[in-house]
Image (tube, helix red, strand yellow):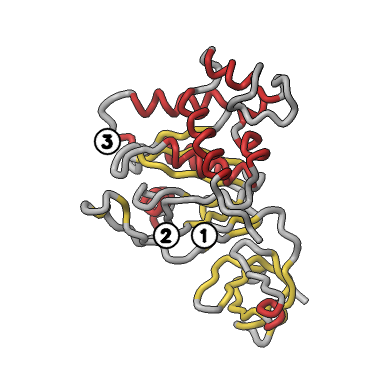
Amino acid sequence: MPTGKIIKALSGFYYVLDRKGVISCRGRGVFRNNKTTLLVGDEVIYEKADDLSGYIMEVLPRKNELIRPPISNVDQAILVFSALEPDFSSKLLDRFLVLVESNNIKPIICVTKMDLVKNDTIKEVVEEYRKIGYNVILTSVREEQSLKEIKAFISNKISVFAGQSGVGKSSLLNAINPTLNIETNTISESLGRGKHTTRHVELLNVNDGLVADTPGFSSLDFEEITKEELGDYFIEIKEKSAECRFRGCLHTAEPKCAVKSAVEHGEIAEFRYQHYKEFLDEINERKPRY
C-alpha cells in the first residue's frame, strides 16, 4: 500500500501528499477505537478507494508531536512574535520555547513589525536570546532582506509557524509567497489581541519546504513537564546546573547554586530566571493527575 504525509485535516477528511499528488482520505474506525488522533505531519500508510479518495490504514512512528498546535514530525518551530500591536512578551516567548524544547524541536525566534519600533528596547531584549544561542530574525513584511533570511531557514525543512494571535504570521507567509493568499485580519482594539484568522493546521509548500500555518493562541500549559525537567528547557540554566552543589537542584532555595550565582553575576538574564521561577511555581501548584 502507498505511503504519504498528511498535509491538511479538515471536517473529518485527511489530505495526504505522496509522489503523485494529494488524495482525500478518511481515517479507519480503529483510530477512534484506540483513541489515536491523526495529525497534520503524520506519515501514513493508506489504501486507495479510487484515484481521488482512500482510507488511512496505519500511522508510522512520529519523531515528535505538539498538542497546541496539533502537528507532528516537525524539524523546527519558527516562533513569531510582534514588536508592537500586540506588544512583545518575553514571558510568552519563554513559554513557547519551553514547549518547543521539551519536544526536541529546534526553535527559531522571529520578531515581526520591526518597522513600528521607535527605540532599541526590543533589540536589547532579543540580543539576550542570541547570547543564549537562539537564532533570531528581526523582520518586517516591508524588508526584503529579512524575508530572505526566513526563506533560507524554511528550505528543505518542515517548519511550524506558531505564536500569539495577531502577530502577523499569515501576513509574513503571504509576503514570503504571495500566491498563498492566506486570510489576515487586524488587531481587536477592545481585546488588544488578534482575531484567529487561521482556523486549521495545514502544511503549505513554501520555498522548497513545508510550512504549517497554525491557529494562533495566547496561553500554554506545562501539563507534561515536571519541576525536575523544567530547567532542562532553559538552555543557559541547563548548562550551569551541572555546576550546582546538589544533584536535582531546582535553583531556588538551595545553597551554592551555580544558576543563582550566574544570575547575580549577569551571566544569566534576570528576566529569564524570573520566568523560570514563575513557571516552576505554576507546575508546583498544578493539581495532581489521577
- Residue that appears at 37% across and 40% down: 112
The disc, 2 or 3, on the residue closer to the chain's N-terminal end is 3
Q: Which numbered tag is attached to residue 168?
A: none
| Residue 20 vertical placement versus 253 (above, below) | below
Which x, y percent locates residue 74? 62, 52
Q: Which numbered tag is attached to residue 180?
A: 2
Q: In terms of secondary structure, where does tag 2 sit?
A: helix
**The furthest residue to the right:** 1
Do labels 1 and 2 touch, CB within 8 Å? yes
- Residue that appears at 49% across and 34% down: 275
* 265 vs 101, nearest the viewer: 265
Which x, y percent locates residue 142? 32, 40
Label 2 neighbour load within 10 Å: few <14, some 14-19, many 20+: some
Q: In terms of secondary structure, where does tag 3 sit?
A: helix
- Report how far apart the C-alphas of labels 2 and 3 lie in the structure: 25 Å
* 255 vs 107, nearest the viewer: 255
- Report how far apart the C-alphas of labels 1 and 2 lie in the structure: 8 Å
Quarter in which the N terminus is drawn: bottom right
Q: Nearer the viewer, mark 2 or mark 3?
A: 3
The disc, 3 or 1, on the residue closer to the chain's N-terminal end is 3
* Amino acid type assigned to the residue bearing label 1 in the image: Leu
Q: Determine whether, in the image, residue 189 is placed left or right of residue 208.
A: left
* Amino acid type assigned to the residue bearing label 3 in the image: Leu
* 224 vs 89, nearest the viewer: 224
Q: Which numbered tag is attached to residue 204?
A: 1
Residue that carries the numbered disc 3 in the rendered image: 116
Do labels 3 and 1 touch, CB within 8 Å? no
Q: Nearer the viewer, mark 3 or mark 1?
A: 3
